[in-house]
Amino acid sequence: MTGAPVTAPASSGTTAAGPATRGAGSRRLYGARNYLALIPFHVYVGLFLILPTLIVAIGAFTTAQGGVTLDNITRMFTDEVFVSAFTKSIQLAVATAIAGAIFGALLAWAVVRGDPNGQLRQIVIAASGVLAQFGGVMLAFAFLATFGFNGLVTIFFKSYLKVDILTDASWLYGLTGLAVVYTYFQIPLMLIVFLPSLDGLRQEWYDASASLGGGGWAFWRHVGGPILAPSFLGALLLLFTNAFSAYATAAALVSQGSPIITLQIASQFQSEVVLGQENVGKALALGMIVIVSIVMAVYALIQRRASRWVR
């Protein structure tokens, strides 16, 4: 006796597809949770970065009455005071970035040559992390207390060494003083940024170069130098941006005049300005944003190349 053919229940297809459907739904829910976790970050970026930038950009092209104008942007390029402020800011940023990059790279190389697990290395890195953020009023006060008219070093030279030429502390309140003060926090910042690239150099690369007959100069010319060049240039651009956008230290140190652009922007918002020129400060800020954006875009491209050698 042959039995009747067995057919699958009509609901079996639904039952078999159920776990797959639920798995896909779970994955979509998991992905949605990941995006929801980023909401606080996006809110922060929107409120404190994007919104202020939009306000500055819109204000740079509007009058005090809300009309559209190009006078604010035009004045930024034609007013000798603003042009001079931009020029001095760029000069200050370039000088301190180069000085900080050179001395910071040498200090980072000295740290790398030491014990990688030593206590001295940890102390230097920790101190650099603190000094890189040591700016503003505290740093200005420290230099005034050291090199000011009544500073410790000034009094020492005047009272004990009887040297009057070094007692003139007026240099501290100009671009020279700002360059010295800025370099103070540029060097430890360079160490922090450049140290991972130096750690990425492999002893095997030097051994391979030596086995092919290359000396120390050949290694740095053909291997070490090309590998570290993108990281060094990227760190140099980062130092430039750091110095170009610094404000608190200069505001605390320079009491008269506004030699750099950040102080000029502050004076536009704090002082009485010419009627109809209220948004010139926003135009100056927009100019800074454009310069910093260009530099950071180049920095991102360089870091993408340098990241291939950092482990």
Image (spheres, rainbow, N blue to C red):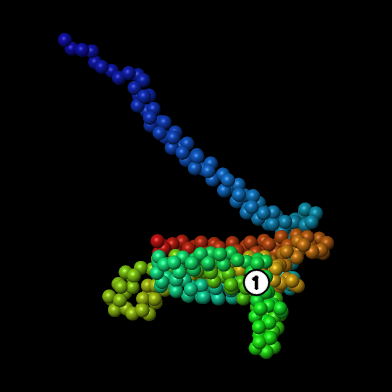
- Nearer-the-camera pick, 166 or 56: 166
- Nearer-the-camera pick, 192 or 302: 192
Q: Which residue is mark 1?
A: 142
Q: Mark 1 Cα within 10 Å, few/some/many (few <14, many 20+)?
A: some
Instruction: Please identify the residue farthest to the right as the structure is shown.
Output: 275
In the rendered view, does 229 fall on the left or right side of 272? Answer: left
Total tally of numbered discs in the picture? 1
Counting from the top left corner in percent of width and height, residue 271 is at 79, 64
Q: Is residue 55 above or below residue 246?
A: above
Residue at left offset 30%, top offset 76%: 210
Counting from the top left corner in percent of width and height, residue 193 is at 50, 65
Residue at left offset 59%, top offset 75%: 95
Residue 39, quarter of the rendered image = top right
Instruction: Please identify the residue farthest to the top as the structure is shown.
Output: 1
Counting from the top left corner in percent of width and height, residue 57 is at 68, 57
Q: Is residue 175 visible?
A: no
Quarter that holds the C terminus: bottom left
Residue at left offset 71%, top offset 60%: 282
Counting from the top left corner in percent of width and height, residue 143 is at 65, 74
Instruction: Please identify the residue farthest to the bottom as the structure is shown.
Output: 162
Instruction: Please identify the residue farthest to the front as the structure is shown.
Output: 160
Quarter that holds the N terminus: top left
Q: Is residue 295 above or below residue 34?
A: below
Question: What kind of element bears circle 1?
Answer: helix
Type of residue at label 1? Ala
In the rendered view, does 268 fall on the left or right side of 11? Answer: right
Q: Is residue 51 visible?
A: yes
In the rendered view, does 243 fall on the left or right side of 3? Answer: right
- Nearer-the-camera pick, 124 or 52: 124
Residue at left offset 67%, top offset 74%: 145
